[in-house]
Amino acid sequence: MVGIFLSIWARGELVKDIGHLKISCTGRGIMGCLGNKGCISISLTFHQTSFCFMCCHLASGEKEGDELRRNYDVAEILKGTRFSRVCKNSNRRIPERILDHE
């Protein structure tokens, strides 16, 4: 995937309180994986609260039906984005999917 960028900044004194940083990329371009359409997601915890930041580039268009394609792409991004566990015994409260976040 090209052309999608997501950056998260934190003050130096807060960095120690950020944990479980994970990144996921979900393509929605040609054949569902190529091109510059899709989403980059970053999952992290800050003071026991989970956050998910997303940057999505969806298909354009104002013709009838274009919004349906965008809605479908969003649904597929929500379904397909996974933040893998570091190990099998890791904390079950750490979100694995976008909608699992607080």
Image (cartoon, rainbow, N blue to C red):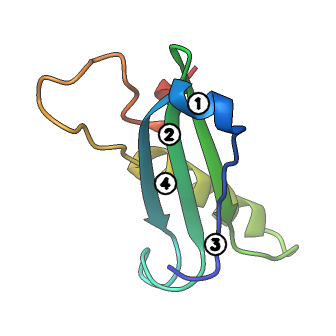
Report the residue at 12% width, 23% height from top: 89
In the image: residue 80, left or right of residue 15:
left
Name the residue type under label 1: Phe
- Name the mark on residue 43: 2
Q: Which residue is mark 4?
A: 76
Report the residue at 54% width, 51% height from top: 41
The span from disc 3 to disc 1 (Cα, nearest Å) is 19 Å
In the image: residue 97, left or right of residue 78:
left
Within-10-Å neighbours for mark 2: few <14, some 14–19, many 20+:
many
Whether residues under marks 2 and 4 lie with C-beta atoms below 8 angstroms apart, the answer is no
Within-10-Å neighbours for mark 4: few <14, some 14–19, many 20+:
some
Q: Which residue is mark 1?
A: 51
Whether residues under marks 3 and 1 lie with C-beta atoms below 8 angstroms apart, the answer is no
Name the residue type under label 3: Ile
Q: Comparing marks 1 and 4, which lies closer to the viewer?
A: 1
Asked if one can make out residue 65 in the rendered structure from this viewpoint, the answer is: no
